[in-house]
């Protein structure tokens, strides 16, 4: 009976370790997905307003230079 408890403990610890590694990998994949989505959103916002922002910066620069 004791060997059965020992074997059960070994199997449990091994499966727990494997699940822990899987959860860490899943978390890393989720972080990568979030970072990718944020980068896409920033790029889309820049593409949509890029020329307006560039024009505003140039106007501000000209205004500061003229002063």
Image: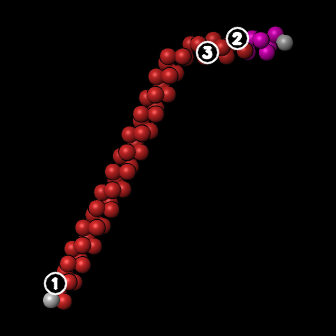
Answer with mark 3 or mark 1, whichever residue precedes in sequence: 1
Mark 3 vs mark 1: give the one in front.
1
Q: Is 44 drawn above or below residue 1 in the view shown?
A: above
Q: Residue at x 41, y 35 (%)?
A: 36
Q: Residue at x 20, y 83 (%)?
A: 5
Q: Which mark is residue 4?
A: 1
Q: Residue at x 55, y 17 (%)?
A: 50
| Tag 2 near tag 3, CB within 8 Å | no
Q: Which mark is residue 13?
A: none
* 8 sits to left or right of 63: left
CA distance separating discs 2 and 3: 9 Å
Secondary-structure class at tag 3:
helix
Q: Quick one: quadrant of the N terminus?
A: bottom left
Residue wearing tag 3: 54
Q: Residues within 10 Å of mark 1 (few under 14, many from 20)?
A: few
Q: Residues within 10 Å of mark 2 (few under 14, many from 20)?
A: few
Q: Main secondary structure of the magenta part?
A: helix
For the magenta stretch, what is the residue range? 61-66
Instruction: Give the total of numbered labels.
Output: 3
| Tag 1 near tag 2, CB within 8 Å | no
* 41 sits to left or right of 23: right
Q: Residues within 10 Å of mark 3 (few under 14, many from 20)?
A: few
**Residue positioned most to the bottom:** 2
CA distance separating discs 1 and 2: 79 Å
Q: Is residue 3 magenta?
A: no
Q: Is 56 drawn above or below residue 30 in the view shown?
A: above
Residue 3 in the image, given as x and y percentages of width and height: 17, 87
**Residue positioned most to the right:** 67
Residue wearing tag 2: 59
Q: Quick one: quadrant of the C terminus?
A: top right
Secondary-structure class at tag 2:
helix
Q: Is 66 drawn above or below residue 43 in the view shown?
A: above
């Amino acid at each position: 009976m004791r060997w059965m408890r020992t074997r059960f403990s070994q199997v449990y610890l091994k499966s727990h370790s494997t699940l822990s590694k899987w959860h860490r990998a899943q978390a890393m994949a989720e972080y990568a997905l979030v970072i990718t989505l944020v980068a896409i959103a920033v790029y889309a916002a820049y593409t949509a307003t890029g020329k307006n922002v560039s024009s505003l910066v140039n106007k501000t620069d000209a205004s500061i230079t003229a002063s």
